[in-house]
Image (tube, grey):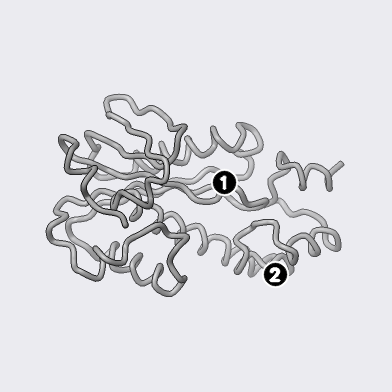
Amino acid sequence: MPTFQIESTCQGLVGGVDEVGRGPWAGPVVAAAAVFLDPASLSPFLVEGIQDSKKLPKAKREAIFESLLALKDFHYGIGSASVEEIDQLNILKATFLAMERAVKTLPQTPTTLLIDGKHIPSFEGIQTHPLIGGDGISLSIAAASIIAKVTRDKMMEALAKTYPVYGWETNAGYGTAQHQTALKIHGITPHHRRSFAPIRALVA
């Protein structure tokens, strides 16, 4: 269960960073940065509820998202990289770009960033620490994962209204059976990642 144990060992303002959307065949990759200014003020609902966004039911994830955004002692930033940037740079570099954009939108620059994953970007003037499975052990990273996940899901739900046959409102752009069937019948859209093998094969 995520805690502030790792954050408490760091000096200065500590932020958590996570991304969502590296694996889907369509849509942007989205990252979020989260900073708790006063962890002691968190309600039991948030302390117990904040965890890896993938482990939370949608309704609870969205409730925690709204509660986080309403906190006075909480800063967050959101960044994304477009399908075009993913195809031009590759998904890892595009993910780093989204993370950099998320951190830049924070109202205060953290002293230290805890970043989910093994391979992470570097930030000038900020200490960075990679944490594999960070969204399962750090509350800051877990909060960032929830913000990124809910934000990207809403983006994909909006796109699904224009492109309803692909089921993006439920599969978020992943290569589900519905998505694959729709691709065979209707082809690709401008929001598909042409550099990804399944989409590249359809283009070819």
Using the numbered discs, state the Cα–Cα distance from disc 2 to disc 1 in whole angstroms: 22 Å
Looking at the image, is 48 positioned above or below residue 59?
above
Looking at the image, is 175 positioned above or below residue 194?
below
Quarter the C terminus occupies: top right
Looking at the image, is 155 positioned above or below residue 35?
below
Q: In the image as oriented, which residue stretches furthest toward the bottom?
A: 59
Give residue 18's position: percent from left, percent from top: 41, 46
Query: Label 2 sits on what residue type?
Result: Pro
| Dot 2: element | helix
Quarter the N terminus occupies: bottom left
Relative to 58, 109 lies left or right: left
Q: Nearer the viewer, residue 22 or 192?
A: 22
The residue that label 1 is drawn on is 22
Give residue 197's position: percent from left, percent from top: 75, 42
The residue that appears at 79% across and 64% down in the rendered structure is 182
Q: In the image as oriented, which residue stretches furthest toward the front?
A: 1
Give residue 146's position: percent from left, percent from top: 40, 58
Choose top left, top right, bottom left or bottom right for residue 111.
Answer: top left
The residue that appears at 59% across and 38% down in the rendered structure is 91
The residue that label 2 is drawn on is 164
Relative to 113, 119 lies left or right: right
Give residue 81's position: percent from left, percent from top: 53, 43
Choose top left, top right, bottom left or bottom right for residue 159.
Answer: bottom right
The residue that appears at 24% across and 43% down in the rendered structure is 6
Name the N-terminal-most of marks 2 and 1. Answer: 1
Choose top left, top right, bottom left or bottom right for residue 87.
Answer: top right
Tell me the crowding category of disc 2: few under 14, some 14 to 19, or many 20 or more residues within 10 angstroms, Cα based.
Answer: few
Query: Label 1 sits on what residue type?
Result: Arg
